Image: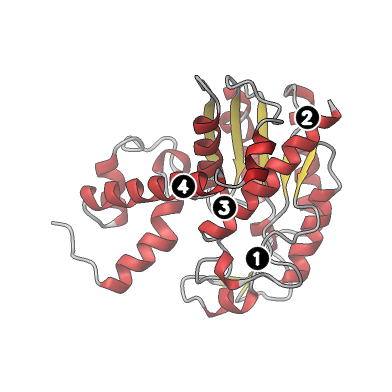
Amino acid sequence: MTKKLSEEEKSVLEQFMVPFFHAEKRHPLFPGRNSVEAEAGLLGIATEELETFRKNYEENAKQAALELLKEDDIIDMIDKLPFDGEETIVAFGDSSTEDAQGWFSILRHLLEISFENADFSFINSGVAYNTTTDALKRLDRDVLLHEPDWVFVSLGTFDIQRLNIAPQRTLIPLSETWENLNTIHEILEAQIGNPTVWITPTPVISELISENPIYEFTIDPEDVEQVRQLVSGKTGGIVDPKGIRMGEGEPKAWNYLTDGLHPSLSGHINTVREMLKTLVEIQARS
């Protein structure tokens, strides 16, 4: 029998666990990886609760797309995108990518609504808390095997965790992050016909990360800036190269969940806006 959750436990699950947990990604050999019942059991909730959570996330992402489509600038940019409506698009990243109501879900709804007779194939290959090392190991299985036309890469944030037990260093040295990103870049450039779209890491609010009891790490804005510079140096398309989409000067709290790390719906909407600008720039160069 499933234990009834307290309101606090339900809030933590709804905000910080369920949107970032899809068993088929974390446990590809798990026999129950495609079973909602098995996933619900792992999370300690009823199947109906998990289905309701996911339905709500999907509706939130769709509504965010509809809000964007009320903006004239967005409509203008959609008309200039380098898509014909039949592309396979893969998002390769960490938590902000896997997020069930994140930028990729919003973008999917935006394109499906906007293109007549759309026949896109959208593949979310984000796995929460992945470092660039974790991601590199699954590049073939989770990206290349899908033979994508376009790949969006959003990585690097979790390389720079500073663990509470070892705050003097980042989890992965910057030199290794650089090597991993370069390797991913070289492989994609050799095998994918269109330019890779690189999404710079989201700025963070370190104080909120440190105060959150579910994390055993923090992330320093200075470390984020170093990774942003690495990503911004890539060829292809660079989304938000100045790192200002969460607020100029300093990130604004309303663009985040209460942890100061994961974007809220408004934060994800900001990323989609910047992504559309980048895609239009790519089209203009072609």
For the point 69% across and 37% down, the residue is: 77
* Mark with earlier residue (4, 3): 4
Q: CA distance from mark 3 to mark 1?
A: 15 Å
What secondary structure is marked by label 3?
helix
Question: Which label is found at residue 121?
Answer: none
The residue type indicated by label 2 comes to Gln
Q: Which residue is mark 4?
A: 61
Label 4 amino acid? Answer: Ala
**Residue ID for mark 3:** 96
For label 3, the crowd category at 10 Å Cα-Cα, with few meaning under 14, some 14 to 19 and many 20 or more, is many
Q: Please name the residue shown 28% across and 46% down the image.
A: 51
The Cα atoms of the two marked residues, 2 and 4, are separated by 26 Å
Q: Is residue 46 left or right of residue 156?
A: left
**Quarter of the picture holding the C terminus:** top right
Which tag, 3 or 1, sits closer to the chain's start?
A: 3
Query: What residue would you read off at disc 2?
Result: 283
